[in-house]
């Protein structure tokens, strides 16, 4: 097993290397210079000031040297300093916002699993039943619905018309005065809509995937064997078929990481949640290059980690993978 | 093969429903100047944020512009973005996939590693990062969505090429002295078009969704050009007073994307009923 994990880790190295090149390339090959915003917007910026800025960000050196400097700093987790007036280290800015983003994504992933898997199983076991057809329609709509629009509708309905749920932030204004229990409840209330919406996009995909897996497994010979030896339908489906149909779901979960992280930009912006996605959006609007590049890099690394965890879990669950 | 396809396609309810929506959208987009009841940019400050009525079927926005007219013109924008962005993605994906599948070995290794790397980036992050560097304009949006959406197509085309290149007709073409480029583009690629067509149809839907999300965030199609996404931005700003600004444009996006998805599924089922 350790050998398998080692192999996966070695496989990640060229990918990580490629990720740094793409991040760096996006930043430096695009027209315009990162210092444009500071110099063009500022009438007092002289040519000399611009040169000093360029030197400060190493922009006066040749590209390959700049890349090496950047990667060298990256290796010790130094993502540089933000362009915003606070000049704080990018790594620090990202780290303080990462936990809430990860919390929401993990919660929505759990929600996706808990809802999508039973839907997929039932649809497959009762293929072409009314339930299967309704689930099918739901899947099509789930694929097509713009989640930010759904967010608006839910905000109007639950937040404004009914007034049940708060529509922005993760805390109420009087948060500090609430007793601990109430404060926790307050956090949960704020998280309900973002988590539900962020899960919604993944639901359709996973339930459809689970359905087709299950359909495929049910047709296998060993299921016929299980039935032939007189096992109850329950045992056949939930013991023999389900375990095998669940395996590939692990991979899909790993693959859904980039989508979830990418989606956090939209949710966090709509619901004013102070997470990494909102920071990314604000940095894009302010052209804060070091932060944009830092989050782009972190986002890709999180995806890579998600895939690694998925691969390792798969190997734990299925011994055949470890051998081949 | 082709007649079979049309026979199955015309019997497939999903495909027909999808085609109806797509054709209707085309007609609306082409006829926009004639069927829109008002000029989409006609500001009327005496009618600001008025609810849907007989005069303004979908109400008016914060500048008193007719929402229905803006949505009809918005259909044009989303169609344009959907097709151009997908076209770019398909072009890149088909060429890279063809090269990787046909030549194999190191060409394949390099291209597919690049695909792996690109797939590590949350697409929406990548798009936003590039937009941070460029001016948000409709052309930049199309190009960026296209440049970040080709990876799936590359994988599909590569898979088709790896199996097709072993077939006898390729050997025959080689035997009569056809060059690599000729074999790739004239002989093999047309045979790989089926999966590309499905991916393209679904890609248009994806591109329209992405454009609307970007415009909603204010970094896509810029006002005063009407787009479904930027009408929704106004909806969010006036969320407590003007529900119609939030409801109708989103419904338009939903129906459009649903239409393309259904069409894509329908084409897939009709091309090969066993693929279901």
Image (spheres, rainbow, N blue to C red):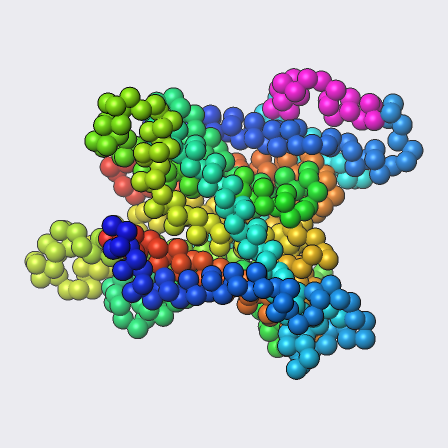
Residue B155 at what x, y percent from top left? 39, 38
Find residue B239 and report its image quarter.
bottom right
Q: Which residues are the magenta region? A: A50-71
Is A57 magenta? The answer is yes
Q: Residue at x 67, y 50 (%)?
A: B219
Residue A152 shown left or right of residue B260 in the figure: right
Q: Residue at x 69, y 32 (%)?
A: A31
Using the image as rendered, state which of residue A84 and residue A190 is in the foreground. Answer: A84
> Which residue is the extreme one toward the bottom?
B54
Residue B60 at what x, y percent from top left? 71, 72
> Which residue is the extreme one toward the right?
A44
Q: How many marks?
A: 0
Residue A73 at what x, y percent from top left? 64, 24
Q: Main secondary structure of the magenta part?
A: helix
Position of the C terminus of chain B, as image quadrant, is: bottom left
Q: Residue at x 60, y 55 (%)?
A: B77
> Which residue is the extreme one toward the left?
A229
């Amino acid at each position: 097993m350790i050998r398998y994990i080692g192999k996966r880790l070695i496989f990640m190295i060229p990918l990580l290397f490629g990720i740094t090149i793409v991040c760096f390339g996006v930043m430096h090959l695009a027209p315009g210079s990162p210092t444009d915003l500071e110099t063009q917007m500022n009438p007092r910026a002289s040519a000399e000031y611009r040169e000093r800025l360029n030197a400060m960000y190493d922009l006066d050196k040749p590209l390959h040297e700049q890349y090496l400097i950047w990667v060298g700093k990256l290796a010790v987790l130094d993502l540089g300093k933000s362009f915003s007036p606070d000049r704080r280290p990018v790594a620090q800015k990202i780290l303080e916002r990462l936990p809430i983003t990860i919390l929401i994504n993990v919660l929505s992933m759990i929600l996706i699993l808990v809802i999508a898997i039973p839907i997929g199983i039932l649809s497959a076991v009762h293929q072409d039943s009314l339930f299967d057809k309704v689930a099918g329609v739901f899947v099509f709509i789930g694929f097509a619905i713009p989640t930010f629009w759904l967010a608006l509708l839910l905000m109007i309905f639950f937040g404004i018309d009914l007034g049940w749920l708060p529509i922005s932030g993760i805390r109420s204004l009087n948060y500090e005065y609430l007793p601990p229990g109430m404060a926790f409840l307050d956090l949960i209330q704020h998280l309900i809509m973002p988590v539900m919406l962020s899960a919604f996009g993944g639901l359709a995909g996973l339930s459809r995937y689970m359905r087709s897996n299950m359909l495929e497994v049910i047709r296998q010979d060993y299921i016929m064997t299980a039935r032939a030896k007189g096992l109850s339908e329950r045992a056949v489906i939930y013991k023999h078929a389900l375990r095998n149909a669940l395996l590939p779901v692990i991979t899909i979960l790993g693959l859904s990481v980039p989508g979830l992280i990418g989606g956090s930009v939209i949710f966090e912006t709509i619901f004013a949640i102070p997470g990494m996605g909102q920071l990314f959006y604000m940095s894009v609007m302010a052209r804060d290059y070091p932060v944009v590049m830092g989050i782009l890099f972190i986002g890709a690394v999180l995806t890579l980690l998600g895939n690694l965890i998925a691969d390792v879990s798969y190997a734990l669950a299925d011994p055949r993978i470890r051998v081949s | 093969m082709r007649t079979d396809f049309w026979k199955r396609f015309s019997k497939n309810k999903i495909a027909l429903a999808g085609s109806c929506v797509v054709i209707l959208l085309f007609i609306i987009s082409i006829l926009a100047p004639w069927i829109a009841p008002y000029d989409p940019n006609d500001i009327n400050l005496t009618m600001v944020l008025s609810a849907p009525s007989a005069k303004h079927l979908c109400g008016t926005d914060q500048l008193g512009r007719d929402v229905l007219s803006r949505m009809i013109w918005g259909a044009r924008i989303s169609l344009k973005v959907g097709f151009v962005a997908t076209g770019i993605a398909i072009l890149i994906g088909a060429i890279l996939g063809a090269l990787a599948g046909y030549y194999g070995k190191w060409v394949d290794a390099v291209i597919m590693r690049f695909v792996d790397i690109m797939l590590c980036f949350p697409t929406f992050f990548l798009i936003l990062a590039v937009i941070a560097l460029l001016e948000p304009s409709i052309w930049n949006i199309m190009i960026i969505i296209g440049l970040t959406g080709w990876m799936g197509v590359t994988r599909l085309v590569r898979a088709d090429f790896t199996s097709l290149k072993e077939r006898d007709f390729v050997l025959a073409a080689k035997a009569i002295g056809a060059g690599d480029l000729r074999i790739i583009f004239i002989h093999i690629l047309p045979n790989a078009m089926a999966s590309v067509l499905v991916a393209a149809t679904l890609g248009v839907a994806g591109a329209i969704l992405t454009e609307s999300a970007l415009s909603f965030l204010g970094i896509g199609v810029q006002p005063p050009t009407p787009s479904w996404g930027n009408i929704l931005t106004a909806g969010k700003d006036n969320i407590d007073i003007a529900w119609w600004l939030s409801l109708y444009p989103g419904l338009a996006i939903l129906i459009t994307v649903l239409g393309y998805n259904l069409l894509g599924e329908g084409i897939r089922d009709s091309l090969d009923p066993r693929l279901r």
